[in-house]
Image (cartoon, rainbow, N blue to C red):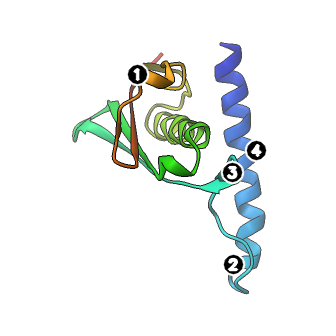
Amino acid sequence: MVRATITLGLVLLVAGCGTLSNLGQGLGIGRKQVLFEGQRFRAKAQAVERRDKQEFVVSVRPVQASLDGARQAAEYQGVRHCIKYFGTSDIDWQIGPDTDPGSLPIDGDTLTFRGSCIDR
């Protein structure tokens, strides 16, 4: 529960920073992309089944930039997905941030997490 509260706080903090960066975008200053371990990652969360948003997968690349950064970016996208569709950051990860690094599914330069939003 403490981890979920901290994660939610970080998401809200980052969301507020995004608003400030939007002010300078018209001038070409700043970007609305979050950095992890100093790197930009392309991450996408999507539902496993189109009509059921509870079960989802997150794909992140490039893993070679930083495995820790890719893991953080995947967790961030998972939290955003669950907040968007269920209003909660609680996630039951089947493959996620606590998975042993040696057991993570990495295909080429893409890391994939799998989770389920906990709808309370």
Q: Amino acid at mark 2?
A: Gln
- Of labels 1 and 2, earlier in sequence is 2
**Residue 67 shown left or right of residue 107 in the figure:** right
- Name the residue tied to disc 4: 13
104 and 18: which one is in front?
104
In this view, 96 is above or below 38:
above
Q: Earlier in the sequence, mark 1 or mark 3?
A: 3
User: Are the residues at dot 1 and dot 2 in contact (C-beta closer than 8 Å)?
Assistant: no
Q: CA distance from mark 2 to mark 4?
A: 19 Å
**Residue that label 1 marks:** 103
Q: Residues within 10 Å of mark 3 (few under 14, many from 20)?
A: few
Q: Secondary structure at mark 1?
A: helix
Res 107 visible: yes
Name the spot of residue 42 as percent of width and height, x first.
Answer: 48, 56
- Judging depth in this view, the residue of 5 and 62 nearest the camera is 62
Q: Which mark is residue 15?
A: 3
Chain-order first, disc 2 or disc 4 = 4
Dot 1, crowdedness within 10 Å: few (<14), some or many (≥20)? Answer: few
Q: Is residue 109 above or below residue 88?
A: below
Identify which amino acid the numbered label 1 is placed on. Answer: Ser
Above or below: residue 47 compared with residue 54: below
Disc 2 to disc 3, C-alpha distance: 15 Å
Query: Which residue, given by chain and number where applicable, does mark 2 sit on?
Result: 25
For the N terminus, the image quarter is top right
Mark 1 vs mark 2: give the one in front.
1
Q: Are marks 1 and 3 in contact (CB under 8 Å)?
A: no
Quadrant for residue 66, please give it.
top right
How far is mark 1 from mark 3, CA to CA? 31 Å
Q: Viewed as shown, does residue 96 lie left or right of 1?
A: left
Residue 52 location, x and y as percent? 26, 32
Identify the residue shown where x is 55% and y is 39%: 67
